Image: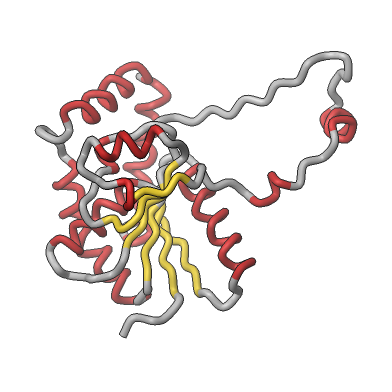
Amino acid sequence: MIKPKRILFLSAPFGHGHAKAAQAVIKAIKQKDPDVDTRLVDVFEEYPDFFGSALTKAYLQFVAKVPKFYGTLYDMQNQYGKYFSMRSVMHMAGAYQMLKLVRKIQPSAIVCTHFLPAGIVDYLIENKYINIPVYGIITDYSLHYWWVFEHIRKYFVGCEAMVASLQQYNIGAEHVLVSGIPSSLDLTKLNSRPEIIQKLNLRPNLPIVAAMVAAPG
């Protein structure tokens, strides 16, 4: 029996942003309703250690050593992934372990912050192994085809342009909410400029620019 108010968050270890977004949402939920049971699971935790660590290490080395080639492949999968893609193979390969996880936790809803677990859960719903509402939080400001799934009940996206991008794949606006990209609630507690300058030992007469950079994925 599915437990009430138990939400399973699924992420992936390709960079820290996906897990951080999930943690930010969990913290906000807990502030609204402490009784909600939330679980955050790295999708590779359900697989043998060598599999998850090897794949993550290979991905990070690939991005670091041949970033232009990685970018080309990323763009090609976005442009032609609908016709030539390995994603369905990845989803089938991960289905058994994901099904075991879902049956063990028995969530009332699933939230994915990375397209890999989202795709595996979509596969389980498509093949009628589970019937649980699934939601997607996209932590980029542009859409990649690997994020497009039929059975995601609602997408939470960072900007209005994402609504139009999803509509190109016949995902109606009623299934998309422009919420911004989740970030830690601590960021709302900003210090004053003099406090920041003193804390970081900056020169007060120079302009200060903060840059946030994220790799695609």
Q: Residue furthest bottom?
A: 1
- Quarter of the figure that contains the N terminus: bottom left
How many numbered marks have been drawn onto this rendered protein structure? 0
Q: Is residue 26 left or right of residue 103?
A: right
Residue 13 seen: no
Residue 203: percent from left, percent from top: 87, 18
Query: Is 138 drawn above or below residue 34 in the view shown?
Result: above
Query: Is 214 drawn above or below residue 42 in the view shown?
Result: above
Residue 54 seen: yes
Image quarter of residue 66? top left
Residue 182: percent from left, percent from top: 54, 47
- Quarter of the figure that contains the C terminus: top left
Q: Is residue 36 left or right of residue 94?
A: right
Question: What colour scheme has been applied to the protein in the rendered image?
Answer: secondary structure
Residue 209: percent from left, percent from top: 70, 21
**Picture residue at 44% right of the left edge, 29% below the top:** 215
Q: Is residue 165 left or right of residue 21?
A: left
Query: Is 173 drawn above or below residue 120 in the view shown?
Result: above
**Picture residue at 14% right of the left edge, 68% below the top:** 128
Residue 46: percent from left, percent from top: 33, 62
**Picture residue at 64% right of the left edge, 66% below the top:** 31
Q: Residue furthest left?
A: 83
Q: Out of 34 and 202, give the one closest to the viewer.
A: 34
Query: Is 65 drawn above or below residue 48 in the view shown?
Result: above
Image quarter of residue 85? top left
Q: Is residue 111 left or right of residue 127?
A: right
**Picture residue at 43% right of the left edge, 33% below the top:** 141
Q: Out of 50 and 153, give the one closest to the viewer.
A: 153
Image quarter of residue 104? bottom left
Q: Out of 1 and 73, give the one closest to the viewer.
A: 1
